[in-house]
Image (cartoon, grey):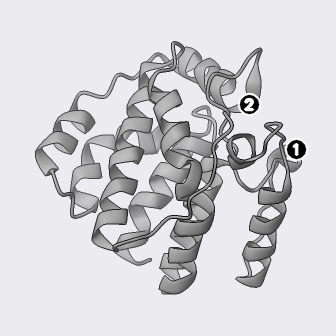
Amino acid sequence: MSTAAVLPRILGALFYYSPQRPDIKALIGCLPTLPSLFAWRDPHTIDELCHSWPVAADDELIWQHSALFEGQGEMVAPPWGSVYQEKDNLLMGETTASYRVFLRQHGLEFDGRHHEPEDQFGLMLLAYSALIARSDQQAARILLEQFLLPWAARYLELLQQNPVSAFYSRLAQVADIYLQNVSYQQALNPAKRRIFF
């Protein structure tokens, strides 16, 4: 796998999969290595963030993930792009449908848990990683500019402010810095969309 594909794959997995999975528990143990996986513009800040990561006890972290990503009660930061980009905050709206077409055009399909929409933030990072791994830079760029970046900053802002989990707040902070770095390095021009959430 391309080294450039490793970090978005790790971040995507942490945003998508429950920490009760052994492979995700292993990734959590590797968080101090994230600074070495990417050419950060401000490596000192990333180093500090990744070496002081607030990790809750296993059961607590599993509950936090469920509350923030699977929805127990009101979700403070829904992880699906359509919620932010659709006027009525609909899941699986028109933006999800157009993203699904894009994925199929590039041979990417996910076996989502419970038929979850493909525009889940972590799943989108995993798709981005898959495109980089196969050296499809143009498709990776389109994914970011057209489908992820238009709403990602708002989502990550809300997740950083969440009252449920310091761990996932920190994850949102690192992911936000990563996407800002990628945008800068690749001179990306994200689509301008109205955000409704």
Q: Quadrant of the C terminus?
A: top right
- Report the Cα–Cα distance between label 1 and label 2: 10 Å
**Relative image position of residue 51 (x, y in whole percent):** 21, 34
**Relative image position of residue 79 (x, y in whole percent):** 65, 39
**Relative image position of residue 30 (x, y in whole percent):** 34, 44
Q: Is residue 52 above or below residue 148?
A: above
Is residue 196 in view? yes
**Relative image position of residue 131 (x, y in whole percent):** 56, 77
Q: Is residue 52 above or below residue 174?
A: above
Indicate the secondary structure of the residue bearing disc 1. helix
In the rendered view, does 111 fall on the left or right side of 79?
Answer: right
Specify the amino acid type for callout 1. Answer: His
Is residue 136 in view? no
Disc number for residue 84: none
Q: Is residue 54 above or below residue 141?
A: above
Indicate the secondary structure of the residue bearing disc 2. helix
The residue depicted at 69 percent of the width and 22 percent of the height is 75
The residue depicted at 61 percent of the width and 24 percent of the height is 62
Residue under pointer 2: 70
Viewer-nearest residue: 184 or 127: 184
Residue under pointer 1: 114
Specify the amino acid type for callout 2. Answer: Glu
| Mark with earlier residue (1, 2) | 2
Q: Quadrant of the N terminus?
A: bottom left
The residue depicted at 15 percent of the width and 50 percent of the height is 42
Viewer-nearest residue: 141 or 61: 141
